[in-house]
Each structure stands twice: as structure tokens, then as C-alpha cells.
Image (tube, grey):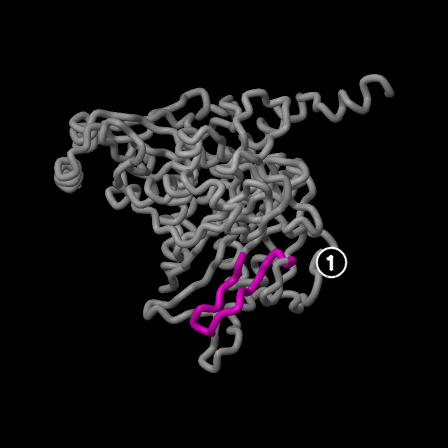
Amino acid sequence: MTQTFQHWISTHRISEIECLVPDMNGVIRGKVLPAAKFIKSEAEGSLRMPSSVFSVDITGAYAGDGDEAYADRDLILFPDVATLHIAPGYKTTTAFVFADTKKPDGTAWPASPRHILKEVVALYTARGWTPVIAPELEFYLTAVNTDPDLPLAPPIGRSGRAETAPQPYGLESITEYENLVETIYEHAAVATLNLDTMIHESGAGQLEINFHHGDPLQLADQVIVFKRLVRQAALTHGVYATFMAKPMAEQPGSAMHLHMSVVDSDGRTLFSDEDGSDSRLFRQFIGGLQTFLPEIAPLFAPTVNSFRRMRPSHSAPINVQWGRDNRSCGLRVPTADAQNRRIENRLPGADANPYLAMASSLLAGYLGIEMALEPSPEATGNAYIYPRTLPKTLEEALERFAGCAPVRERLGEAFFEAFLAIKQSELDHFQGVISSWERDHLLLKA
């Protein structure tokens, strides 16, 4: 492995290596090393990072108070050579590589989101199956805002004006940000991201990027890298890019829709029978999504802001109804031929950790097959008229998540405890903040 790294780094004349470790929120932690130091450390197995990297909440504070949290043992980093790519936008020729984290005894660190996704994919592999994922990721461009007490606003475009109204699929609207879009595509090409189409979404300054379908782990890695390079590219053009689920109160939220299918060892879909009809496994997969996704919402709706997006008639589902080519459903079956039959999970927000959003979706579908769960009748028309089955707040979501025994058993107690500690810490921070709404309506009236 060391020779492979050495050859690639020498061939591309790399000076520095970024060793990336995504944390529980999908925030990139890691180290930057001179190329020679990286090669030497990788060969010696001396790349290390404290286990507390998986205890950091979104505020930067450490969560959890068990023995392991205080011991804060070193983990060994094992760079994944398949993820070694040139990092765009640097003056010094830089590459990045994702690293897996292991204990000194060689076992994987159980709270690593990348490890969690690998474990879920392994359930399919054990049956001779391969899950296939295609993410669609929405995000906003906003004017620079250095005061968190002030609302965000759309940025000024090439015309010198900011958008004030929805422009879904507007070609003139997306060309307002043509220079930035070109930079994003250029950087994505350097980083070898497998991108498809970019469109203007419904919100003012809201864009969406589609990824080509492929291996879940590779796609989760690509989503992480894409978020980073978009934020960096936006800054160079004098604007912000945000993947908050609901950054502006009067604008639609941003999602990370996940198109999912499963194929056998010969590449044939398991979601269709030979006559082209829905297969038993397809129905059971949907049944699993309907049963478990409402119970494990924090894995795809991880912040208090995530639940502001889930409002009726705001292009964000509130339940797990399923239907064909029906975007009001949480689970949509797009129009496709039998071989390409798939399920679009429309629940995850753009703020979700892609490893955990994909792992939770695939695990819910897998449990549906394992437990032979049948779906509800197909929904037609407006699915918002059905009762809400998703939690309304992060607090409610965490209570339901903690009690979901089948998922807890599959993902492991260590992961559950670490994840719950982080989310509870974030919720406590949020609940300690006095909002502008309270000051506006209660200050002189209560």
C-alpha cells in the first residue's frame, strides 16, 4: 500500500496531504502533512488521532462523560488509497485522502460514521447483493452575513440584483451565478467527483446538484468533498454557500434526496420481477423504510434546523407515504423501466451526514426485507393530507431514536451512546439560546 501512495504522490508531484476524518455531523476533521511525512507515517502505522474527534458536537464542544471520553485514547488512521485525489483550489499542490479509524488492536472504531455505512453495506454483501445510491443535494447561495443575529439574504448576481422570487429550473437565474458554477464544476473535475446535472431549485439563490449513481461509500465521500469545495469556491466569489436544511424562513428547505436500488451479483435489479412488476423484496424494502425511518429521524435530520424544513406543502415530506412519481410522498418511486426501478427517499435534509443518512435508509430497507414487512397502500394525490408520522422536533426525534431496538442492535451500543450524547449536547446548547422571536413578541408584552 505504501508503494501505491508513494507512486501516486510522486507522479502528481504532491507537496501536502490532507488526511480526512468525517465526524458524527459530517464535519471534516483531520491532519495536513507534508507528502514525505505522510508516506513515512502511513508506512509505520503512526498516523494517529484522539478518539474524542467522534465526540465533538456541531458547536465544537465535547459531548459524553464516560470513561472512554476522559481516556481519549489514540486511534490509528488507515488512509483509504481508493479515495486519494487532488484537492482543488490550493496554491501548493495538495491531495486529500479519507482515513478509517481503528483501535490499536486493529478493530474499527465503532462510532465512526464511515464505519457504520460500511457495516450496513456488508449486510447486503453477505447476501450477494449490492446497494446502489444516487444523491441529489440542494444548497443555497447567500450574501455574506457575519452577524448570526441577522437573517440570511440571497446574493447579488451578475445583473447586480438579488433574486426576490422562486425561479425553479430558471436558466436565466442560474446564469446569474455562472462564474461560480463554472468554478464548482472545475474544482469537482479536479477532485474526480462524478457529478451529473446542476439546476436552479425553487428558492431564491437555491441550486441542486445530482450525482451519478454508484457505491454508497464512494458517494458519501463525494458528498462530503462537494460540500467543502462549494463552500470554498463560494467564498472566492464573495458569497456564502450553505447546506442548512432551512436557512431562510420564507424560502423552501434544502434536501439530500437519496435514490436507492439493490442489484444481485449479475447486476440485475431485485426490485422487479421478470414480468416487470414490483418484486416482493421491493415491497418489503418500502415496508422497512415506512416502519423505521420515523423512529430514526436524527440520522437524516440531525439538527434543530432540520425539522423547520419538514412542513406541509413546502416541498418537504411530513410522513412516509409512498407513491409513483409523487413528490408529496416521503418515499417516491420515479418513472423508470423495470431494471431501473428505484426508491427516492425524500426525507433527508442537506444538513445530514451522508454516511448516516445512507446507512439509516439502507438499514431500514434491509430490515424490511429481513422482517418481511409489507408497505401501506400506494398514496395517490396530495400525500400531505395524511397524518404526520415524522417527529416535529429534535427532542421528540431523539426520544424515538433511543428506543428503536432493531436499529440500535444493528448499529451497536457504542455508536448509539456517542451519537445520542452529541445530539443531546447540541439540543441543550440550542435550548439555552433566547431567540429574536421571544425578544420581539414577549419583551414588552409578557
Residue 166, compared with residue 337, is above or below; it is above
Image spot of residue 220 (x, y percent): 41, 46
Image spot of residue 141 (x, y percent): 51, 37
Residue sitting at 16 percent across and 40 percent down?
8
The magenta segment is: 328-344
Could one spot residue 112 in this view of the protein? no
Which residue occupies the extreme bottom position in the image?
A: 275
Is residue 272 found inside the magenta-colored segment of the image?
no
Is residue 334 found inside the magenta-colored segment of the image?
yes
Is 359 situated left or right of 204 in this image? left
Which residue occupies the extreme right position in the image?
A: 445
Q: Which residue is mark 1?
A: 386
Circle 1 SS class: loop
Residue sitting at 21 percent across and 29 percent down?
38
Q: Residues within 10 Å of mark 1 (few under 14, many from 20)?
A: few
Front in this rendered view, residue 258 or 399: 258
Residue 368, compared with residue 187, is above or below; it is below
Residue sitting at 67 percent across and 54 percent down?
319
Image spot of residue 198 (x, y percent): 45, 50
Could one spot residue 71 in this view of the protein? yes
Residue sitting at 51 percent across and 48 percent down?
172
Query: Based on the displayed image, in which of its 4 quarters is residue 234 positioned?
Result: top left
